[in-house]
Image: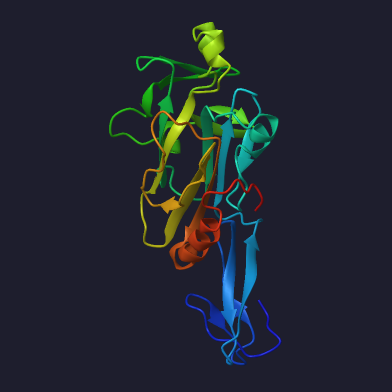
Amino acid sequence: MKANEKIRKINAWEISEQDTLLTKEFSCNVLYPLPVTDFAGNTASVDIKVDKATNIEIFFAGISKVFKWETTKGVGEIVGKDSLNNNIENKLEALAYMWKGIDKDFIQIKTYTHTYSEYQKGQIIWGAYETPFYAGYNPPGEEYATTASGRGAAVNGIGSLFLGGITTDTFNGSVPKEIAEKNLFGISAVTFRLKDYSYYSIVYQIWINGKGWLEPVSDGEETKVAYDKPIGAFRVSLIPKTEKQYLVDYWKKDIGTNNMEF
């Protein structure tokens, strides 16, 4: 990042002897605004966008009953946006995930699935792949899901694992039609955590119809309105801890809104 006048040093960035060039190496994709201040005290915001990082690649996807996977690589993409454009009442029923370049258990995930019956359970079936889902927490108990448990099916060409339950709203015809049409069921709570926080944080935010975007949270915090209020969209980013607050502040501007731009 090059300036046409001298600028102040920023934590965790290298600066040239002339105080005009800032550099930083990113191993994963990021998108956030970085405040830059000159020696006169004037501050401007510069968009930092890294979207071709290959050392660490993350992939998260979500699907509603319109059966179209929407994906994110951690640069601000909103999973669920297309589904909501189809019907603002749509809820995300399942997530898929995969990452490369870090330990298979580095990112750990837990979701809560709201279903028609508290005893409901079934199989996510995607091609030749099947995995169980449960009413309540997935995985159940104190477990968290990671890619260490193996590969699932391909989503947009990427072998991924699944959480939640596709067809939660209809559940193979077992949910009465008049109730299924109300789009009441799906994933209602999400928690992401990391195996190690020495360098990275993970930041995530959910959107719920009637509430808009909730407060962005990070590093093992559960985010929800209530267990019976499924989400319509979410976004997630793995980011160096030194840049975390910039991203949190960026997403905070959307709290309570329906903004789907990034």
Q: Quadrant of residue 197?
A: bottom left
* Nearer the observer, 58 or 259: 259
Q: Is residue 103 visible?
A: yes
What colouring does the structure picture have? rainbow
* Residue 59 drawn at (x, y percent): 57, 42
Q: Is residue 174 above or below residue 165?
A: above
* Nearer the observer, 240 or 171: 171
Q: Is residue 170 visible?
A: no
Compared across the picture, whether 108 is left or right of 86 comes to: left
Q: Is residue 166 above or below residue 57?
A: above
* Residue 82 drawn at (x, y percent): 68, 36
* Residue 253 drawn at (x, y percent): 55, 58
* Nearer the observer, 226 or 104: 226
Compared across the picture, whether 44 is left or right of 211 comes to: right
**Which residue appears farthest toward the front when viewing the image?**
210
So how many labels did they put on this image?
0
* Nearer the observer, 52 or 1: 1
Residue in the image at 47% along x and 53% along y = 203
The quadrant of the rendering that contains the N terminus is bottom right
**Which residue appears farthest toward the left when viewing the image?**
142
Residue in the image at 60% along x and 22% along y = 65
* Residue 125 drawn at (x, y percent): 54, 17
